[in-house]
Structure formats: C-alpha cells, structure tokens
Image (spheres, helix red, strand yellow):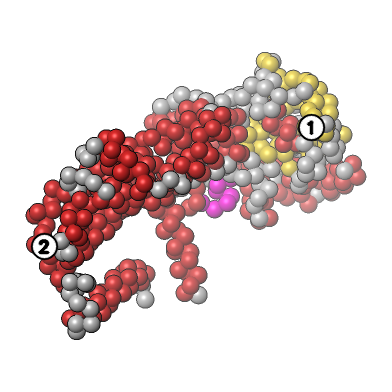
Amino acid sequence: MPKKSVNIANKLVPWLFLILIGLLWQLVVDRGLIQRFILPSPWDILATLLRIFPEIKVHLMTTIREALLGLFIAVILSLTLALLMDSFPLMKKAVYPVLIVSQTIPAIVLAPLFALWFGFGELPKIIIVVLVCFFPVVISLMDGLNSVDPDMINLFRSMGAGQWHLFRHLKLAASMTNFFSGLRIAATYSIMGAVIAEWLGGITGLGVYMIRVKHSYALDKVFAVILIIVALSMLIFKGIAWSENLLMPWRRLLNKNQSEVNSNGQTK
Amino acid sequence: MNFCPQNKIKLAVNNIKKTFEDTPVIKNVSMELHEGEFVSLIGLSGSGKSTIFNIIAGLLLPDEGSVIIDGEEFTGKTGRVSYMYQKDLLLPWKNIIDNASLPLVIKGYRKKDARQEVSGYFPTFGLAGFEHKYPFQLSGGMRQRAALMRTFFFSKDIMLLDEPFGGLDAITRSRMQDWLLEVLPALNSSVLFITHDIEEAILLSDRIYILTDRPARVKEELRVPLPKARTREITTTGEFNEIKKYIFSIL
C-alpha cells in the first residue's frame, strides 16, 4: 500500500473503533437493556447537544476564558521559575522539592478554600487552572534544561558565549521538546481544572451548568457537556501541536525522517 | 622540503601543570604552534590530551604555566580559540548555515550578516547545496565538515581539533583526511590536532608531539620529514613506514 493511504488508514482506525462502541451503546439503550434516564443513547446526546448549544454558550465562553488565561499564566510563571532555578542553584535546591511535594495536595480540596477567599467569580477558577497546569510545564522545562549536553555548554563557553547566548541559542532550544510535552499535558488539564473548580461553586461555566443539569437528572445534558469538554481539550491540544510545528520546524522533519526509516524497515 | 617553518609562533603553551584531586594529569607540558603549521598530539587515550585543549581554550585554568597566543597572555580566558570534538555538537534545531554562523552571532554579528559571511565557504567545505538542511539530514562526514566550518569561523587563524574523525568509519575517515589535505592550504590556519591514529598524524602533520601516559609529558617532538604537499600515495612509501616504525618504537 502506498504510504499516504497507510497513514489515512491509521488515522481512521480509532474513529472506526469509536463508531463501533457508539453503535453498541445505541443498541443497548434502544433495546431497553438500560433505561434512557439512566443512560441516554449517543443519538439522544447529539440531539440534546444541538438543542442546548445556544443556552450554554455563555458557560462555554467562561470556561474557555478561565482555561486559556490560566494556562497562559502558568506558562509564563513556569518559564520564569525554571529560568531562575537554572540560573541560581540555591533557588533550585530550595524550591524544587517543595514544588514536588506541593503536588500531593489535591486541587479539589483547594477549590472551596479559594471560593471562600476569592469569591465565586472567575478568579479562584483561574488560580486552580494555574496550579494544575504549572507543575507539568515547570517540571518538563527543568528536565529539558538539565538534559543539555555539557560538551555543548563547554563549546559555547569556549566560544566566549555569555549567559544570554547560552540561554537563547542552546538551553531554551534544547528544552523546547520537553517544554511542549509538558505543555500538552497541561493543556488537557486546563479545561478539566476549570470545570472542576466551577463544579465546586460558581456563577457561570460548564461545571456550574453540569451540576445544575445533574441535579435535575437531565443526564443527556450532562453527557452533552462532557462531549464539549472533550472537544475543547482536543482543540487546545491540537493548537499546541500546531504551534510546536511552527516553532520547531526541524522536529517535524526529524520525525518524518525517522518514520520513513521505520516504514522502510517494515516493508523489507 | 619544508623541515622547519620559520614562521612566527601563533600559540605557545609554557610549562603547564594540572592536577585533578591529587592525580597529576599534565606535568610540565610545553609546546608551540607556528603560523600555518599543522601539529599533532598523539598518546594513549586518557593521557590528558583533551585537558591540554581545555586549558588552551580557556575552559580550565592550569595549576602552573601559561598560554600565550600571538604574544598575548590567554591563560584561563575563553573566546579566543575554539575547538572541535569527535562529536559534531551541531545544534539539531538549527540548519547548517545557522550552525556554521553561530560563532559570528555570539561575537555580535547580525544573523543576516553572519549568514552572508559564511555562505561563500560552503563549496570549500564540500557542503554547497546543504545550507538549509538540518544536521540529521547529513552524513557523518558532512556533519564533521560542518563542525569544522563552525570552528573555522570562530577562530580562522588557530583551530584545535580533538580527534575530529575518531567517530567515523574507516573509509569516510580516509576521505576526510584527503579532503583536509586538499583544503588546508586555502584555509591558511594553524592547526593543533589530537589523534590516536599514527598514520593519520604522519599524513597530516608538519610536526608531532608524542605524549606519555598519565601524567602527560612531551616524550618526543618529531618533525615529519615529508614534503608539505601530500596525497594518500605517500602512505605507501618507505619513508612513511620508517617514521611509523619510529613512532611505534617510542610508544
């Protein structure tokens, strides 16, 4: 098979699998094996999604705003902190362990506290998103900065490079791959973090809406919102993959090179 | 025949000593490199040759002794001479032209000017047409030539090459040696070259320093009594084999 159609087939496989599960699910509900108010069928969910979309638009916008703003702040913070920890070993010694231990505190416990301190507006939600997204980004950035080949650093130093050139041409670029893998994780956390924070109290947002419809046992609406959350997370994920390709064109070429080598190996 | 270049001294290493945690690594090493000269250092691996390079490049401070370049003291000062490794150390995220022009960018050139400056040298280094390729798209030999180009642009007059062909297969390595012989007169650099390969050292060098095992001392300084313009054919002559035999007897 030509390579292009192999690629398309590979992308199709998970979709076909998903459709298969959907059909099964539909069948189970249609046959009355599970009652509709316990588990709505996929078709019901899609229909509901279209019907409720106008009324949840405002909730959707709130969640997107909180997630993106939180993610953005988290990235800025982690870049700053990683840079500081890399430049000042004492800072790293002091902060790094605390950072790791801090991750054992579940965000879900903090949300009500933040609501208490900062009210029911968007601010406490943004803080939750920042806390949730910050960690994977800063850790992967630190890993990236630590993984720079010491011989490379020596080469730069022998050429008389100062801290700025060392950072700009070597360290930052070398840690980009790690940075983006952390950012992809953070991106999927961002929507989830916002929704969980809203769930625990708020005025608008998908989480607020979800808790409302759940209380009225409108499970088709709950599932419709889940669908939106998945779509949103995927969208941010894709956006990051896209900016990764834009910022690191060499990476795409490298992957292409490697997959060509692999597929050549397979055909033999 | 060019037995003793009477050119001026580009680089002098005076009586350097270096000890790492009570283990003496270098003991009273002195050597010099004249203008346009190609000088090899041979010795067993781990004999401190790379440490000598690190001291010359200014990355390490010797316990005693000094490094003089063009009559000026450069002991422990980076930014005058750079060196090239067995690993190419090209930045995978920069294409070849940006890798080669990196030293100029560090020196403060604007990116565009740096590119313009290096672009004319791509044919010389056998890399014409590969300016915008990334390192992983090149063969091992080409990557080493690109690394040499970067070293050249950092300090055209003096290059320190630390086993630059050590990681290449035998055929590519001999091709690189042939290419280096061909291109050196055009580059007009003074080269200090570390190698394990005795044949390589004789083929390329005007002079050879043979070092002892740890701690490194200069055991013997040897002028290669062969004409300066050489090709691979010379490796099969009796003269060449005599030199080789002599070096083996010292090692």
Q: Secondary structure at mark 1?
A: loop
Q: Where does label 2 land, which residue?
A: A50
**Which residue is at a point 50% across and 70% down the rendered structure image?**
A265
Q: Relative to residue A25, is residue B143 drawn left or right?
A: right
Q: Residue B195, relative to residue A158: is it above or below?
A: below
Chain designation of label 1: B
Hey, what amino acid is under mark 2?
Leu
- Residue B117 image offset from top left, x and y in percent: 45, 31
User: Considering depth in this image, is B209 or B81 the residue closer to the camera?
Assistant: B81
Q: Position of residue B61 (x, y in %)?
A: 71, 24
Direction bottom: furthest residue: A31
The reply to whether the magenta stretch includes residue B163 is: no
Is any atom of residue A179 visible in this view? Answer: no
Q: Nearer the viewer, residue B17 or B200?
A: B17
What quarter of the picture does the N terminus of chain B occupy? top right
Mark 1 = which residue?
B21
* Rendered location of residue A11, percent (x, y): 32, 68
